Amino acid sequence: MRNSLLYSSCCCLCLALCAAAPKDSAKAPAASVPAAAAQAKAARPPAVSTGPAAEVDRLADQLKSSNLGKRAHAAYKLGEMRSGAKTAVLEIANLLTDSNPVVRGYAADALAKIGPDAANGIPALANALSDPSDYVRGYAANALGHIGFEAREAVPELIKSLRDRHPTVRGYAANALGDIGAAIRETLPPLYRELHHTDPKVRIRAAQKMGELESRTKMIVGALSVAMKDRNPKVRSCAVMSLGKTGAGAKSAVPALSGALKDSDRWVRTYAAEALIKIDRDGR
């Protein structure tokens, strides 16, 4: 279900530097070492900022271009830099309100590629789940899944997306909920240890955090259980796979998963069996 935007782009930058020594330099009067050094320094061209950071800054500036092709290209290139473009997350997120849906799609896909480092873009991505464009909504959901644990606050919006009019968006939302659920499950073991900490304040914070995460997990599992009844088999497959990702936290969905073993779609049946095995293994 995780399709990527495949846009071809080409950018080439060439820089040529040349210097010629005076032909009669041998006849020039000798200069002191400090004076020669000073002259050489003055003759040097001004330093040019290069490297990944400079490239991120350059592309971030292009995100504000009046040319939609440049904006889209800059978002694409920043996405290809993965976590190296994390300093431009807010600028990329601003493109989620761009007037052009292609640019908005590039922006959402770029945030997905940046992954967990794109957490600052979560509010904009959550809003993009109601974008008029089907594929922008889908890529926004996909990005939230790639961000993982930090995107848990967007769970209510993702649950609404399970009722989206487009099946691909519903599939992306199911995948995202599964990824977030899996990330929550990975966070719980350290909190269990903190429940036995000698400092009562640490135990209180751990208990509060666990309560919040358990609540989010129940929301995710309940919503995915409903999505297993979707009329589209691909959406049902995504919902079943996502419950498997959630592991032991999806124990309450075992009856629904057992029923899915008789689904008319063979992939739903296969993924249901795998999910049941995973839930049982993680619960031991």
Image (cartoon, helix red, strand yellow):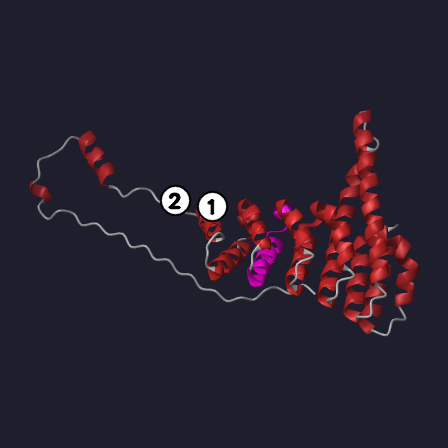
Amino acid type shown at disc 1: Ala
Q: Is residue 244 left or right of residue 27?
A: right
Residue 264 belongs to magenta span: no
x and y, in percent, of residue 20 in the image: 18, 50
The numbered dot on residue 222 is none
**Quadrant assignment, res 276:** bottom right
Q: In terms of secondary structure, where does tag 1 sit?
A: helix
Kindly identify the residue that appears in the image at 56 percent across and 61 percent down: 100
Residue 116 belongs to magenta span: yes
Closer to the camera, 176 or 108? 108
x and y, in percent, of residue 101 in the image: 58, 62
Amino acid type shown at disc 2: Ser
Task: Find disc 2 in the rendering and name its residue.
Answer: 49
Closer to the camera, 13 or 138? 138
Closer to the camera, 175 or 165? 165
- State the separation of the CA atoms marked 2 and 1: 9 Å
Q: Main secondary structure of the magenta part?
A: helix
Q: Can residue 116 be seen?
A: no
Task: Find disc 1 in the rendering and name its residue.
Answer: 53
Which of the image's four quarters has the N terminus?
Answer: bottom right
Q: Is residue 198 above or below residue 174?
A: above
Q: Is residue 162 left or right of residue 119?
A: right
x and y, in percent, of residue 221 in the image: 84, 54
Q: Are marks 2 and 1 in contact (CB under 8 Å)?
A: yes
The mark total stands at 2
Closer to the camera, 227 or 86? 227
Q: Is residue 156 left or right of residue 139?
A: right
Which stretch is magenta? 100-119
Crowding at label 2, few (<14), some or many (≥20) Cα neighbours within 10 Å?
few
